[in-house]
Amino acid sequence: MYFSIGIVLIYGFSVFIVPITEETGWDRTVVAAVVAPIAVVNGLMSPVVGALTDRFGPRRVLAVSSMSMAIGLIGVGIASQNLTTFIVAVAVASLMGAAQTGVPYTYVVVGWFSARRGLALGVMLSFVGLGIATLPPFLALLISEWGWRFAFMAAGLISMAVTLPVALFAIRDPPVLQRPDRTGGEGHTVRRAVETASFWLMLGAFFLNYFAAAAGSISLPVVLADRGADPAMAALVMSLVGLSFIVMRLGFGALLDRFPPVPLTSLAFLSPVVGHFILLNSEGLIPVYVSAVFFGLATGAEGDAIGYLLSKRFGMRSFGKLFGINYMALTMGAGLGPASLHIMAAEGTRYVEAFSIFAGIAAIAPILLMLDRRTRALTR
């Protein structure tokens, strides 16, 4: 999870934007918007990855995707000679690394753990936060020393050196559960799940929360640069996002095992509202770092909640496919949110309007979760 495609190509991409535009002269809004096709490709592939995981098991899926993701990232460094080839190369890399996401890894944990499922998910997914905290500064260092093209290639090689041995020697496929799950509820098929209001309300809540939270967190280095921070200080803010992400993952995962999950998740989903309000009503550097904490809390909570709530509500019968569909909403939000914010902000001239709109969008997510009475009843 530390080297998942989202860490490198979505959160890590935040430190590439300014160096790429300074070296090439490409339009900053267009370069920043490249996060959108990354998320779209990952999002559209998530249900496919979920289906493949249900069919072949996470171990095989992760082994193949480890190698293909590395090839894709190396290709970005080699092929990016103009803006068009850069966009195509990034989209291809996103496609080739589409299975190095939380879909197969969450399948492993949910398939093996029952009594302490929330805590197990929190521990595993906390490494996403560690990646957010440490990879962007590391990539920024590589960029400053050897350039952004070398940084993409290095990221590909390093990620494969870690994820391939894990897939081959550490991952073990959990039992296939084509029967009532361990919580006592019968597992749903995909068709049966999508006919429920619970499915669509959760899908909408997951999308909107990540749409608002990722837009805020991934835009922070650019916001800091616009407020006069040097590149090193701007990259450091992602470490703060990652640290708060880790704290929330570990703490929230344990809380899910002890308290009603839906009200707890709804409360956590208010964090991006606070983050955008802080940015909206400030001008200095310190408030940006404060807002980073709230964006990290929001994304940290969602990672635990999405697998936990889906497994509780719909069982394990089609968990891979259902998680893949919901993960699609999450990744779509992660890509479309930052791109939309950059467009609304008009290169820093309309931040007030952008942050106001995103605060309103973020407020809808917890409302959607609390609307479904059946989900609340089943997850108490």
Image: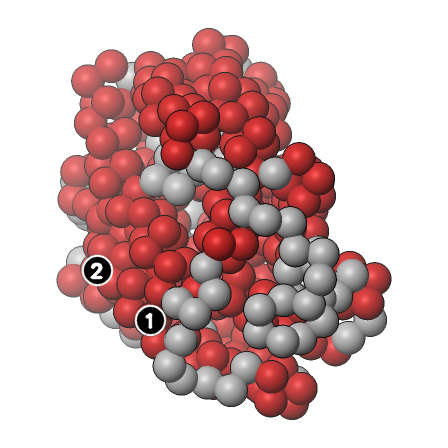
Give the residue at x 45% y 15%.
74
User: 25 above or below 275?
Assistant: above
Is residue 256 something one can see in this rendering?
yes
Which dot marks residue 254?
A: 1
Left or right: residue 190 compared with residue 329 = right
User: Which of 164 and 295 lies nearest the eye of the viewer?
Assistant: 164
**Residue denoted by label 2:** 289
User: Which of 352 and 138 lies nearest the eye of the viewer?
Assistant: 138
**Residue 181's image quarter?**
bottom right
| Tag 1 secondary structure | helix
**Where in the figure is residue 126, as x and y percent of width and height?**
32, 53
Left or right: residue 163 compared with residue 321 = left
User: 23 above or below 318?
Assistant: above
**Where in the figure is residue 119, as x and y percent of width and height?**
35, 65
Q: Amino acid at mark 1?
A: Ala
First of labels 2, 1 by sequence position: 1
